[in-house]
Amino acid sequence: MKVMIIGGGGREHAIAVSAAKSSRVTKLYCAPGNAGIEEVAECVPIGVMEFERLVAFAKEKEVDLVIVGPDDPLVGGLADAFAEAGIRVFGPRKNAAIIEGSKAFSKELMKKYGIPTAAYEVFSDADAAMEYLKTARFPIVLKADGLALGKGVLICNNLQEALDGVKEIMLDKHFGSAGNQMVIEEFMTGREVSVLAFCDGTTIKTMTSAQDHKRAKDGDQGLNTGGMGTFSPSPFYTAEVDAFCQKHIYQPTMDAMKAEGRDFVGVLFCGLMLTADGPKVLEYNARFGDPETQVVLPRMKNDMIDVMEACIDGRLSEITLEFEDNAAVCVVLASEGYPEHYEKGLPITGLENFSGKDGYAVFHAGTKKDAEGRIVTNGGRVLGVTALGADLKQARANAYAATEWVQFANKYKRNDIGKAIDEA
């Protein structure tokens, strides 16, 4: 079968590698792809929001299955466009992707259906938000309602920080139209865990757990990023935690979306906080996480295409998800200055060191080929170096060793990805 992946980051590279392993896939396309994806798929220069061109290309090439990676096209209705054209697509329709597209929607959904989450208020007026903050307890969390590349969340320790945050989100529009509405949320403390799940609208089956590191600098300091690294499984996500979440979070979310007429088919990402009062939902995403995908998919035993087709056909209940009894760690190699200002076009060397090495992968996030055919940096997050190990400590040691195999000017990484493992 012919498969087309939409997107061009590390998540899509990991998806492409998994798709290429399937015995059923005879041809793989990716739009727009990147220099790493090019090694396993034919990349086509079509942007993720160019819906008409994407559909036309899929029709022309008689693509059998489309996998949509990023959030923007899903929230914009790309899955609907493919479905309406009679092309099988893995990813939620627009009316279900709103679970990520609007934080206000997802918070109201959790409140209505009794799904545990932080206390919150929603504001569309900056002055009202500022008045509310004068009576609030700190620290407190401000969230732009819409999509903000994983960066529209501010943790404020005092009133002045919070007032500045309202100005940044709602008045200065630092995150664009995502800040037209804002959620002000109770600050929760505890361990964060990410759980991805395959969904067919009725059944939900969770993958192995992971834990992301969002802050730019060691010790969870610095600005929020799209993710500086991750590990899987999380030692804090115990059997007891899983049992609670299956009963009170995962299936209730599926049921709630169905009850609202928004059947969710695709991957649901549940960002959890393991609080003293039990697990609570921090956020939902309507797709594979990045960089969580880079540690979850390499551990999955199933043929990913089989699972995705089962979701589309409403027979996920027939599938048993299986994962290797091992661990994975991904360390992101970024350009110095990310997530603010950074240089692009810097040559990358040493990528060949990963060739043929079992248990190691380098997923391209922001790369391209220049006019001379060299692979160069093309984004803030450049590469995701992933390594497997018998346990998390071994995987972590392997991943950090492998980060030295590849070089580019202004290379930057956090040195404490997975350090929480030592505390488990």
Image (spheres, grey):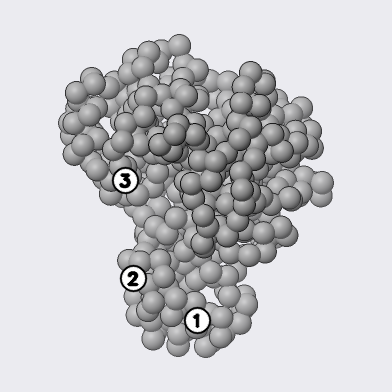
Give the left or right position of residue 264, taking residue 283 as reference: left
Number of residues whose C-alpha sits closer than 10 Å to that of mark 2, classed few (under 14), some (14–19) or many (20 or more): some
- What element does badge 1 sit on? helix
- Total marks in image: 3
Residue beneath label 1, please? 164
- What element does badge 2 sit on? loop
Q: Amino acid at mark 2?
A: Asn
Residue 28 vertical placement versus 190 (above, below): above
Q: CA distance from mark 3 to mark 1?
A: 31 Å
Residue furthest to the right in view is 422
* Label 3 or label 1, whichever comes before in sequence order: 3
Residue 129 vertical placement versus 186 (above, below): below
Q: Amino acid at mark 1?
A: Asp
- What element does badge 3 sit on? helix
Give the left or right position of residue 303, taking residue 97 as reference: right
Residue beneath label 3, please? 73
Give the left or right position of residue 120, taking residue 311 as reference: right
Q: Pinpoint residue 272: horizontal percent, then vertical percent.
A: 58, 52
